[in-house]
Amino acid sequence: MMIKKMAYGLLVLLILGTGSIFVSYSNFSEERLTAIKTGSKILDTAAGPMEYQQIGNNGPVLLFLHGTPGGYDQAIPFEGTRVLAPSRPGFLRTPLETGRTPQEQADAYAALMDSLGIDQVIVMGASGGGPSAIAFAARHPDRTVALIALEAVSQPFSVEDQAIEMPFLMRSDFYMWASLSAMKTLMGPEGIVEAVVPNPKNQRLLLDDPAKLGMMESLMWSSWPISQRQLGQANDFAQFADLDLNASAIIVPTLIIHGTEDINVEYTQSIALAQQIPGAILHAVDGADHMMPFSHSKEMTAAIEEFLTGLKAL
């Protein structure tokens, strides 16, 4: 039903004015691409080139590893930390050759830390960033203060078996822009939320809070340009099918947060991860889906802040 609505919306936009559409798209592209290029830096590390952004100046370093598709521009800042947000290999301006497997990517992050003079980090892996975050904690325990797995992929699975939302948006940069524009113009906030949030209760949590709704919209737009993220996305999907992360070797404090109604990365993934990592804390967010960082942001943030506060006492 949603795809039919989107197709109708795109047809209406094309009928209303093809010329104005391409002018709007050109302006959007120029502005967005400029923002992406100026918002990050690239370092030639021992593992290869890596794009990154740093947010904040004080506190422990939080290595934030984005999901799929993503990039440095999807980093979540946390008060009291200095966020180091790389674009994982294959995304934006980090070449896939810098690291294909989660283990290779983990070593690439260590190389980035070497280049920046950073000794230790709290590593957080969100969704598709989970495998390389887990691999980092397992392979570099001396450089890992703690691990936070946020609705993270941690066990083997086939993407074809998962309810990955809106694959039609990922066909091209223009199609993605036109689809999101049509959704917002013709269907309003309700259409945007309906497209990515399956649970009506969670839809209402977002629609009733303009700040949460705005953050979710920003995340959707931050996947553009999809053309600069497709290599990383394809590589992630290939890696997910045959994961062996050696999670049982992790010896650092670990917090695992996951929504119980997540259909993109199922909650059972985090149940298994908690069983594999000695002493891991599993925080289940009842009723939350994959948009948990927005719909249930207060509960998620409170759990992370409590965990980080506990680290200071160690």
Image (tube, helix red, strand yellow):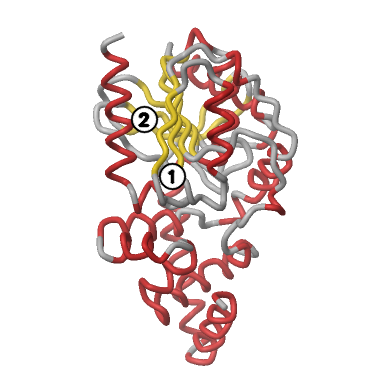
Residue ID for mark 1:
73
Left or right of 68 on screen, residue 236: right
Q: Amino acid at mark 2?
A: Val
Where is residue 5 drawn, in percent x and y? 53, 81
Left or right of 294 on screen, residue 312: left
Q: Is residue 159 positioned above or below 105 on the image?
A: below
Q: What quarter of the picture does the N terminus occupy?
A: bottom right
Q: Nearer the viewer, residue 310 or 84?
A: 310
Q: Earlier in the sequence, mark 1 or mark 2?
A: 1
Q: Is residue 165 positioned above or below 302 on the image?
A: below
Q: Amino acid at mark 1?
A: Asp
Residue ID for mark 2:
83
Mark 1: secondary structure: helix
Residue at position x 46%, y 75% in the image: 183
Q: Disc 1 versus disc 2: distance between alpha carbons? A: 12 Å
Residue at position x 72%, y 46% in the image: 158
